[in-house]
Amino acid sequence: MISNHLSLVEALRPKANELAAQVAEFVAAGGRIEEGPASGYIPKPITYSSQMPPAPKPFVRRRVEPIAPPPITPLERQEEERRQRVAKVMELAPTHTQKEVALATGIGRRTLLSMSKEFGFSFKRVHHLPNSSPEHKAAIAKHELILAERIKAYKKLGISRRQVCEKLHITNNTLKRLLDEHEIDYPLSRAGGNRCAA
């Protein structure tokens, strides 16, 4: 070990040389120096073995349990229902007029117009036929038959005549005429109840 105190080392050097000379003289005279047992901690001897180290344990991938998706929020449910309605309307639009799509889906014509502007699609054009042509009369009869079936369905639900008018986008006079032509007994609302708008 090299001491940092060089002055102390140099001061003790004469005594060290004298002690070394005495040891050499003792050995030269036939003396023998014996090494005594170590005191305190005795380190273990270093041993070398040719045995291979144990093989590492195989890596086992931990099984990850699937995490259940969070429940759908009311806002997400409304957005999904709206996407479905829009997809249905876009499917019907190329082959149906706006009025026909309104009858088929129950969606108001203003809402359909807003959808068409927002998503960039258009409805089938309406081809106006002469009022006296057979095609025009057949189209009107088919349309009124659909209205009559819807009126019967609304009657079973127990809704008022006014609500029927609003849902079918027809006037009170049109409703009365359809009830008479198709012999539908649709009771009037009680006094003070809702009535169809003229």
Image (cartoon, rainbow, N blue to C red):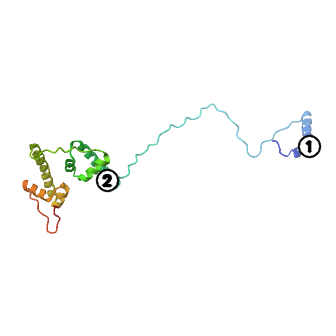
Instruction: Indicate the secondary structure of the residue bearing disc 1.
Output: helix
Label 1 neighbour load within 10 Å: few <14, some 14-19, many 20+: few
Residue 182 in sight in this render: no
Q: What amino acid type is highlighted by mark number 2? A: Gln
Q: Which mark is residue 141?
A: none
Q: Is residue 138 above or below residue 170?
A: above
Residue 114 in sight in this render: yes
First in sequence: mark 2 or mark 1? 1
Which residue, given by chain and number where applicable, does mark 2 sit on? Answer: 78
Instruction: Estimate the x, y position of residue 130 in percent, counting from the top left.
Output: 12, 45
Q: Which residue is depicted at the point 92% across and 40% down?
A: 18
Calculate the distance from the C-alpha at mark 2 to the C-alpha at mark 1.
Answer: 101 Å
Q: What amino acid type is highlighted by mark number 1? A: Lys
Which residue, given by chain and number where applicable, does mark 1 sit on? Answer: 15
Q: Which residue is depicted at the point 92% across and 37% down?
A: 21
Instruction: Estimate the x, y position of residue 56 in percent, counting from the top left.
Output: 54, 36
